[in-house]
Amino acid sequence: MTEITIMSAGHAIPAYLEIPAGQGPWPGIVVLHDALGQSGASRQQVDWLAASGYLAIAPDLFSRDNKLLCLLAVSRQLAARHGTAFNDIEAARVHVMGAQTAPVVPGSWDSA
């Protein structure tokens, strides 16, 4: 298990990343948490996917403000189909793509 930070539009986003055993490249998956936010359940999904051969990452979409304000903001952004939550998901996707060609170590990754 690896707790990392990815950069999205100048903001550090905490994320949970798991790399499957064996030699890559691997298919990649971005796991999105539910309305309660990042939890053990989303981390378990990442672990399960990695055990099944997927490079999986779960960004914390509620890391920009307090949980309630983030929940409201992300809900509005989902309805509008754009916003910082989409930027954060894209940063996680780019991180997974980059992890296919470079070793992944805990730290920062600037995708914005």
Image (cartoon, rainbow, N blue to C red):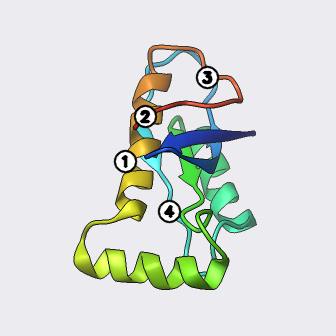
Q: Amino acid at mark 4?
A: Leu
Neighbours of disc 1 within 10 Å: few (<14), some (14-19), many (20+): some
How far apart are the two marked residues, 2 and 4, measured between alpha carbons?
Answer: 18 Å
Where is residue 70? Give x, y as percent.
55, 76
Q: Which residue is mark 1?
A: 90
At a point 50% along the width and 24% down the height, the residue shown is: 99
Q: Amino acid at mark 2?
A: Ser
- Which mark is nearer the camera, 2 or 4? 2
Neighbours of disc 3 within 10 Å: few (<14), some (14-19), many (20+): some
Q: Nearer the viewer, residue 38 or 41?
A: 38
Q: Quadrant of residue 52?
A: top right
For marks 1 and 3 on the same chain, the one whose residue lies earlier in the sequence:
1
Where is residue 35? Give x, y as percent.
55, 81
Q: Which residue is mark 3?
A: 104
Q: Which residue is mark 4?
A: 32
Left of 2 or right of it: where is 102? left
Left of 61 or right of it: where is 78? left
At a point 24% along the width and 77% down the height, the residue shown is: 80
Q: Amino acid at mark 3?
A: Val
How far apart are the two marked residues, 4 and 1, measured between alpha carbons?
Answer: 12 Å
